[in-house]
Image: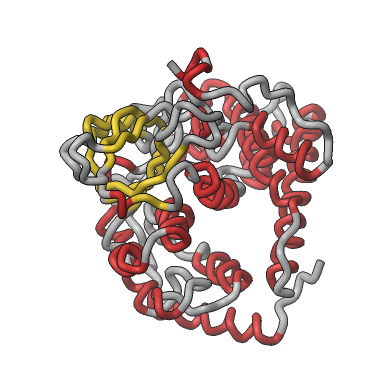
């Protein structure tokens, strides 16, 4: 690993620092961390970044980017994080949906959507998960059938769930079952849809954290043009892999209160003997484990950054990020809330330790262990594709989807 910027990277970092110093917000009053009541501030910051070419640095200049390198994106993100910027409701669209559109849509569609998305004028969501499918995207039961009038249009009916940001999204990409007579991975097709279509109904899900960032989405006779198809008919699984790989990269780094915040809270919290809780041997052992895990993740990311800096493709080691960080967030949050004793039940940001950061970790971590693929799914991927272990037995791999009990 190389921990130092190259001369070109150092120059770019200085350029970014100067621009942020002149343009980044100095304060942010706060709002819904999932973007619901802060859209105006988020859109304003996104538009300012887009005008300077910093919104999607690696994208070609003709699409509003800089034609830059992945390491430049890493540098900008690291420097931007030093400022109190508003939430980013564009991450799913720009990180997952629009790249899929750019890869598989026709030129007219790309020209219509890429510019407004990068400028923050339109927001996208990803419609994959279903109540009966879980992490099995190929188990999709939402149907898209040809319109009976011979127009070539498609009619979509079904339900998606756990769709982040659907309540304020303008467009989305949706995976549908278009052929139930073939195995489940072969009968899927991807489309982009207008979320304001009257046949689309969005119902926010009230979460235990108090937020409503996830949604149920229902489709009732939603008509889409064949030109809204992304990729070939029946090629939806191949198209979705592009989106899924971007998703797992996007959710790979957990945020929230970490080991250093825990250590400071423990130092200020009375222990069983009246002294600092930080003197408790069992607590110190956990803290040491979290520190080692955090350093391992940091240096794994450094390896990825080094590969990007050299123009190489990062290896599969980055796949472990979400598994380790999500579990650590959950364990650390639970231990912190228990350590705080009676104060552990207080989640008022004005009263709770770290403005409720530990409580947020406790309530958010279980969802993070599901988003972008469950722990079990990612462990299978690592086992099979990284370690080369034999694959799981999949009894539904070669039978028509209509003959599967869950496919009826």
Towards the viewer: 397 or 371:
397
Question: Residue 118 sits in which quadrant?
Answer: bottom left
For this orientation, the residue located farthest to the left is: 198
Q: Quadrant of the C terminus?
A: top left
Figure check: 297 above or below 336: below
The answer to whether residue 363 shows anywhere in this view is yes
- Residue 121: image x %, image y %? 27, 62
Is residue 141 found left or right of 226 in the rendered image?
right
Towards the viewer: 392 or 166:
392
Question: Residue 278 sits in which quadrant?
Answer: top right
Residue at 74 percent of width and 68 percent of height:
306
Towards the viewer: 296 or 233:
233
The answer to whether residue 264 shows anywhere in this view is no
Q: How many marks?
A: 0
- Residue 122: image x %, image y %? 28, 58
Q: Quadrant of the N terminus?
A: bottom right
- Residue 353: image x %, image y %? 51, 37
- Residue 360: image x %, image y %? 49, 35
Is residue 316 found left or right of 214 in the rendered image?
right
């Amino acid at each position: 690993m190389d921990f130092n910027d190259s001369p070109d990277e150092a120059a770019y970092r200085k350029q970014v620092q100067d621009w942020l110093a002149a343009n980044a917000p100095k304060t942010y009053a706060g709002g819904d961390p999932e973007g619901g009541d802060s859209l105006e501030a988020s859109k304003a910051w996104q538009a300012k970044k887009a005008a300077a070419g910093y919104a999607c640095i690696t994208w070609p200049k003709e699409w509003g980017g800089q034609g830059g390198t992945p390491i430049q994106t890493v540098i900008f993100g690291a420097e931007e994080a030093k400022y109190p910027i508003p939430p980013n409701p564009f991450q799913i669209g720009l990180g997952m949906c629009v790249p899929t559109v750019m890869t598989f849509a026709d030129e007219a569609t790309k020209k219509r959507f890429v510019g407004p998305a990068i400028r923050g004028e339109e927001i996208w969501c990803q419609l994959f998960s279903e109540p009966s499918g879980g992490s099995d995207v190929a188990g999709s039961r939402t149907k898209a059938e040809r319109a009976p009038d011979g127009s070539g249009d498609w009619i979509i009916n079904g339900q998606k769930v756990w769709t982040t940001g659907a309540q304020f999204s303008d467009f989305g990409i949706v995976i549908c079952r278009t052929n139930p007579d073939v195995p489940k991975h072969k009968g899927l097709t991807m489309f982009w849809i207008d979320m304001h279509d009257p046949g689309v109904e969005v119902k926010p899900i009230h979460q235990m954290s108090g937020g409503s960032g996830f949604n149920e989405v229902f489709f009732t006779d939603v008509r889409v043009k064949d030109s809204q198809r992304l990729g070939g008919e029946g090629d939806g699984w191949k198209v979705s892999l592009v989106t899924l790989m971007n998703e797992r990269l996007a959710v790979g780094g957990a945020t929230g209160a970490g080991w250093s915040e825990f250590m400071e809270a423990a130092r200020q919290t009375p222990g069983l003997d009246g002294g600092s809780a930080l003197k408790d041997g069992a607590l110190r052992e956990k803290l040491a484990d979290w520190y080692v895990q955090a350093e391992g993740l940091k240096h794994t990311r450094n390896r990825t950054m080094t590969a990007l800096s050299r123009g190489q493709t990062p290896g599969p080691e980055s796949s472990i990020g979400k598994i380790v960080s999500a579990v650590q967030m959950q364990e650390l949050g639970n231990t912190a809330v228990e350590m705080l004793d009676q104060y552990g039940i207080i989640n008022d940001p004005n009263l709770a330790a770290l403005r409720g950061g530990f409580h947020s970790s406790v309530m958010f971590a279980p969802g993070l262990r599901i988003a972008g693929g469950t722990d079990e799914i990612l462990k299978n991927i690592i086992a099979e594709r990284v370690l080369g272990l034999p694959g799981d037995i999949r009894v539904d791999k070669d039978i028509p989807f209509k003959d599967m009990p869950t496919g009826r």
